[in-house]
Image: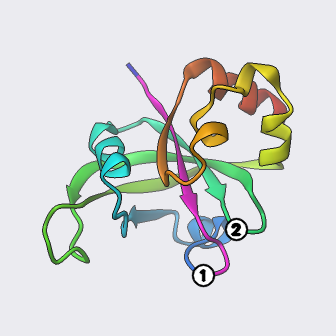
Amino acid sequence: MKQFWLIKTEPDNDWSWSDQLKKNIEPWDGVRNYAARKNLQSMKKNDLAFFYHSGKDKCIMGIVKIVKEAYPDPSDKSGKFVMVDVKSFKSFATPVTLSKIKSINELDKMVLVNNSRLSVQPVKKSEWEIICKIAK
């Protein structure tokens, strides 16, 4: 069964949606949080994830597809953390802002609203559908 996710990046310092589109397929590495690691380990090939710009933008820019399941992150010297490979899937004509998400009652339980610091988080199917409808 397909699962849905949200992955966060700092576009000014780290990786932006335009960087992702240029590369198309790229490892999602550098995660150093145990809850986020567990979510990376739960991702399956063909799952979809919202690509979220944190920092000043605070918006979902598009969707990536998981094309390679969790494997060791070579940038982690401890050997405890993993990464997945993501592929650009869909750009949103209208990015969905955090303020827009917070304004929708049906999204008030969303992890992004209640634990905004978690860099890799699950998204319920109902939440996914609402956000995709807004983004078009």
Name the foreground residue: 48 vs 39. Answer: 39
Q: Tell me residue 123's x, y (percent).
A: 54, 31
- Height in image: 44 above or below 54? above
Question: What element does badge 2 sit on?
Answer: loop
Residue drawn at x 48%, y 42% is: 121
Q: Which residues are magenta?
A: 2-12
Give amino acid for label 1.
Asn
Q: Is residue 76 magenta?
A: no
> Residue farthest to the left?
79
Q: What residue would you read off at disc 2?
A: 55
Asked if disc 1 and disc 2 are in contact, CB closer than 8 Å, the reply is yes
Q: What residue would you read off at disc 1?
A: 13
Quadrant hosting residue 54: bottom right
Specify whether 79 is left or right of 50: left
Between label 1 and label 2, give the one nearer the viewer: 2
Specify whether 120 is left or right of 43: right
